[in-house]
Amino acid sequence: MTSQPPTADANGIIRYGVAGGTGQGGQHMPFARAVQADGWLYVSGQVPMQDGEVVEGGIVAQSHVAIRHVMAILAEAGYEPQHVVRCGVWLDDPRDFAAFNKVFREYFGDHPPARACVESRLVVDAKVEVDCVAYKPATRASPAEG
């Protein structure tokens, strides 16, 4: 069975991943992976999880997983890294700042967004969480020539 892409509600808002998001231990998450409105895409915070569990590894491995999740959501909604205007980053350990920056640069080096980075306790064993806001002007049909 192929899943249908989400459609806009009466307000023109599209919600991605409402029906199937899972968190640690397979728990259903009560929020969308992303929400799109008027060309703006708000991607929820992504942690380095696979199959409901935080992946093993240090900050470099976990950063790649978290950012790949963000990239997959962007692609699902038809956005690319150059559309990202802001990222939020939460690090469990501020000593990981330099290592995280190296990974971040691999994905956003050509089009760096604005960014905030803070130290914060995260879900068990997660070392990083990343969210973003992206913007892409809505494409409009050209008026018929006549």
Image: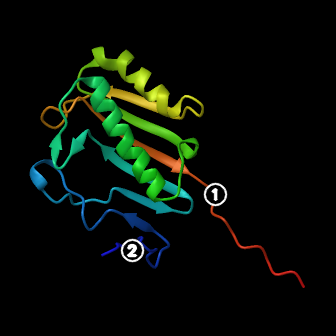
Relative to 81, is 34 above or below? below
Name the side, left or right, on which 38 lies relative to 70.
right
Q: Residue furthest bottom?
A: 146
Specify the label residue 4 is tagged with.
2
In this view, the residue in front, 36 or 109, is 109
The residue to which callout 1 is attached is: 137
Q: Disc 1 residue type?
A: Pro
In the rendered image, the quadrant that contains the C terminus is bottom right
Count of numbered circles in the view: 2
Residue 22 in percent (x, y) is at: 19, 56
Relative to 68, is 39 above or below? below
Residue at (44% x, 74% y) in the render: 7
The colouring scheme, among rainbow, by chain, secondary structure or one colour, is rainbow
Evaluate if marks 1 and 2 touch, with contact meaning CB atoms under 8 Å apart.
Answer: no
Name the side, left or right, on which 70 lies relative to 83.
left
Of circles 1 and 2, the one toward us is: 2
Q: Disc 2 residue type?
A: Gln
**Secondary structure beneath disc 2?**
loop
Residue 129 in percent (x, y) is at: 30, 36
Residue 27 in percent (x, y) is at: 12, 56
The alpha-carbon separation of the residues under discs 1 and 2 comes to 23 Å
**Secondary structure beneath disc 1?**
loop
In this view, the residue in front, 49 or 122, is 49
Relative to 12, is 80 above or below? above
Q: Earlier in the sequence, mark 1 or mark 2?
A: 2
Relative to 104, is 1 above or below? below
Specify the label residue 86 is tagged with.
none
Residue at (24% x, 20% y) in the render: 93
Residue 49 in percent (x, y) is at: 22, 43
The image quadrant that residue 48 belongs to is top left
